[in-house]
Image: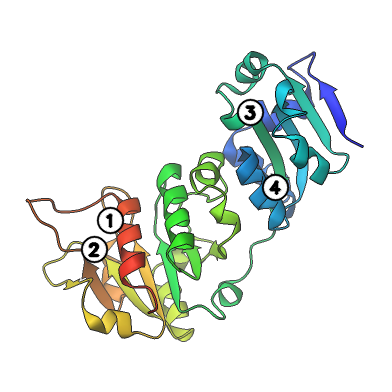
């Protein structure tokens, strides 16, 4: 039976998860295994539910109760469904809701690197990428272009930030991922060694005079390859490049030296996929 609650007071503490807690507070205000993230739009929420994520509460425009939110409500049991008109919800959250629906969901415990990579042949490693839009776009490309998993380093942004989840179109729930190392001291040296022990060769995507072309057959021929992508602007740190087995670049023309990391990731994933 749906537990639909009309919002009469936007200061209700139960609405804090949608309105007054930062992404960091959502992630860490409770024990890590009880952290919360926000999924936005019906399609994204449905993909999270399909993947087994646990809903906590919904925030939904009134018109969607019997419209595009109806099936989601039916799947979520008796969790609270807070509702009001679009203007009230925009005033509460500070932004217009995409497709008029938000869902607070529990963060699952992250699997180990070994579990994520157990049957993988191609993985993406994201080093220090902090822009949520880029993270979401990279996950979408990784899912679409046959990456088996994504690993994020300790300095990388959170793939479960609301904007990252939305830009990924929910593919963050479809492709296995985890963090490689819990602190900055565990990347790059220990992290790359860990990948090597799992049988991966590592390819650092970087601008370098000694880099080989992404079209080199030896890269495609690798049985297990980790494609390492660096932060916006500065790219990979020198130590990461030095520790990787290959330094790889995408050939450019017209004097362009590089692509946005999300665009570069899509090209790399396509070119270096398992044939």
Q: Which residue lies furthest to the left in this view?
A: 254
- Mark 2 or 3, which is nearer the eye? 3
Q: Where is residue 270 in the image (x, y as percent from the top left)?
A: 34, 66
How many neighbours does mark 2 have within 10 angstroms: few (below 14), some (14-19), or many (20 or more)? many
Q: Does the rendering let one see residue 131?
A: no
Q: Is residue 148 left or right of residue 267?
A: right
- Mark 1 or 3, which is nearer the eye? 3
Q: Do the residues labelled 2 and 1 touch (CB within 8 Å)?
A: yes
Q: Residue 35 carries which label?
A: 4
How many neighbours does mark 3 have within 10 angstroms: few (below 14), some (14-19), or many (20 or more)? many
Q: Residue 100 carries which label?
A: 3
Disc 2: which residue:
206
Relative to 42, is 143 above or below?
Answer: below
Secondary structure beneath disc 1?
loop
Relative to 168, is 14 above or below?
Answer: above
Q: Earlier in the sequence, mark 2 or mark 3?
A: 3
Disc 1: which residue:
235
């Amino acid at each position: 039976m749906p537990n639909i609650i009309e919002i009469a007071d936007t200061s209700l503490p139960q609405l804090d998860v949608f309105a007054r807690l930062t992404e960091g507070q959502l992630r860490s205000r409770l024990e890590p295994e009880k952290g919360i993230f926000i999924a936005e739009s019906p399609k994204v929420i449905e993909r999270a539910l399909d993947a087994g994520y646990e809903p906590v509460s919904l925030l939904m425009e009134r018109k969607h109760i019997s419209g595009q939110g109806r099936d989601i409500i039916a799947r979520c049991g008796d969790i609270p469904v807070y509702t009001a008109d679009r203007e009230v919800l925009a005033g509460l959250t500070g932004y217009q809701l995409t497709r008029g629906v938000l869902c607070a969901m529990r963060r699952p415990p992250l699997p180990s690197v070994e579990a994520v990579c157990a049957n993988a042949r191609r993985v993406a490693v994201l080093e220090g990428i902090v822009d949520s839009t880029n993270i979401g776009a990279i996950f979408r490309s990784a899912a679409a272009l046959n990456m088996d998993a994504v690993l994020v380093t300790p300095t990388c942004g959170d793939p479960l930030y609301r904007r990252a989840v939305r830009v990924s179109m929910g593919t963050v729930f479809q492709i296995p991922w985890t963090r490689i190392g819990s602190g900055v001291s565990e990347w790059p040296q220990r992290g790359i060694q860990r990948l090597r022990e799992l049988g991966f060769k590592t390819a650092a995507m970087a601008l370098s005079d000694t880099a080989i072309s992404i079209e080199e057959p030896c890269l495609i021929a690798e049985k297990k390859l980790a494609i390492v992508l660096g932060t916006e602007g500065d790219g990979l740190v020198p130590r990461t490049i030095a520790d990787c087995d290959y330094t790889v670049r995408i050939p450019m023309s017209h004097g362009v030296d590089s692509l946005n990391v999300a665009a570069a990731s899509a090209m790399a994933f396509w070119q270096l996929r398992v044939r």
